Image (cartoon, coloured by chain):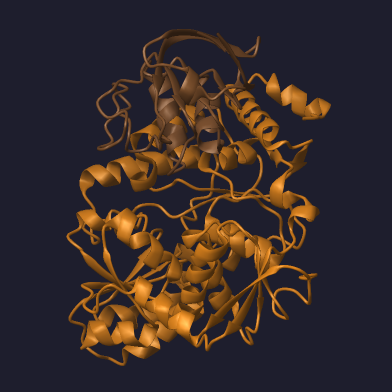
Chain colours: A brown, B orange
Amino acid sequence: MKIKGREVVEGKAHGEILISEEPIGFYGSVDIETGEFIEEGHQLEGKNISGKILVFPKGKGSTVGSYVIYGLAKNGKAPAAIVNEETETIVATGCILGEIPCIDNPDKDIFKVLEDGSEAHLDTNKGFLEV
Amino acid sequence: MHLTKEEEKLLEDDNPAIRKAMKLLTKLGDIYGAEEMVEVSSAQASGVSYKSIGDPGIKFLEEFAEEGGEVSIPTFANPAGMDLEKWREMNISESFAKKQNRIIEAMEKMGITITASCTPYLWSNLPRKNEHIAWAESSAVSFANSVIGAKTNREGGPSALAAAITGRTPKHGLHLEENREPTHIIEVDAELESISGFGALGSWVGREVEDGKPYFKGIKKAGTDELKGLGAAMAASGAVALYFVEDITVDSKDTRGLEKLQFGEEEKEEEYQELNKTENPELVVFGCPHCSINEIRDISNELKDEEMNKELWVCTSKAVKAWADRMGYTEKIEEAGGKVVCDTCNVVCPIEDMRYERTGTNSGKAANYLPGFCEQKVMFSNKEKLIEKVTK
């Protein structure tokens, strides 16, 4: 299956899908050294986002989130790629600085058609995510 | 987005910080649907406090500075997490101070002037009407757009820094005249006798209009300090970056067909109750946004040689403090037992780690941020009542 989207940050990535139906505010939610999701009560609590194709609706919260995404990339613990319904500026800035491939505006309902743990390949030049 | 030849060269520049900055702006421009860049004449760097940006922020700023990041236009820093000189007197920990100083050093290395204040327009950086700028402090953005008539979006920390380095920002949003029209009419029928009255109004309107552009009718009088407080509150409870006050900031605007909201005495009282959660503050803080010299004079006059039994901070910039020192206002506040604190405020300093639980403020902005960012119970009131609390 292919999901088409808009390129926010170019690149190719391969990894397991990890889905959050809740928005993510990275500051205070993710351990920058390990990639572990630490926000209590969040759907992803206890999961590790490192190397995953992270699927969530959009970013939220503090603009410091951009620095967290960048820091994860510098520590080698960033997601392999990010797929959003709508990438707002906090996540976009983090992905641009951390050179993390990112697409948004998917042509399908990503929360219905994608499943946690399935292998996927993203190539923004081709403009799609392939599961 | 269309880039000029010069801008395309910046994307290929030998300096990696310039390349990165230009790439960030180009990408953000594409996301916002900007057609081109606009040159900006000054920038304001936010995310200066260690409390706000943490270790990831230090890492980012130090690497940018290390790679040769240097500002190409006048750039001023927002408040830090402590008084940069008298932090020990504030009971800031050594470890916090060390990290805060690394942020300041990285910014200095890039050529950012360490004004450490949210009110540069009061004493060092006053843009002119229609000047394009890239500012990041939400209250200063609101003041620059609304009171001065300069043009800026609400930049984030990294995008403001990128604008400072390249001298450009994507031309979209409030840089375009067609996006600078009012969205709501606010009919004010209440006495706004003090800065806290304007703060209550701003806090209420920000929540109602979110990122709208309110047009106020019925405000008879408002000075610079009142407008500074009004805009700051709307940018905290909402995301207002441009507002209009009839006969004060604008002569008139076409407001036909806009949604009307009424703010009367009842709404004002309700907003005070909404923000006021205690009558017993341990600490009273003025200066959110940073106090002007007139506000400091008024506070020092109000003290009337009374002994204080609780703590009082008056937050301001280093520049304004110099005048307060010269005029004897600082001495009067200190003799009464208060402090004039520079470079920071009670929102961006680690007040929650300094044993405080209840803070008094006359600021609509601080009253919105203190419960969440600083775990404080807030007393929200006017200057006179707050000073009564620390002296009686």
In the picture, measured across the screen, residue B355 lies left or right of residue B154, that is left
Residue B137 at x, y percent in the picture: 53, 54
Q: Nearer the viewer, residue B306 or B217?
A: B217
Residue A119 at x, y percent in the picture: 43, 7
Q: Is residue B346 visible?
A: no
In the picture, measured across the screen, residue B181 lies left or right of residue B307, that is right
Residue that appears at 51% across and 42% down: B157
Q: Quadrant of the N terminus of chain B?
A: top right
Residue that appears at 65% across and 11% down: A125
Q: Is residue B58 above or below residue B117?
A: above
Q: Quadrant of residue A103?
A: top right
Q: Nearer the viewer, residue B107 or A117?
A: A117
Residue that appears at 24% across and 26% down: A46
Q: Is residue B178 above or below residue A50?
A: below
Residue reaching furthest to the bottom: B304
Residue that appears at 32% across and 56% down: B372
Q: Quadrant of residue B82?
A: bottom left
Residue B250 at x, y percent in the picture: 74, 74
Residue B123 at x, y percent in the picture: 58, 66
In the picture, measured across the screen, residue A30 lies left or right of residue A127, that is left
Q: Nearer the viewer, residue B303 or A113?
A: A113
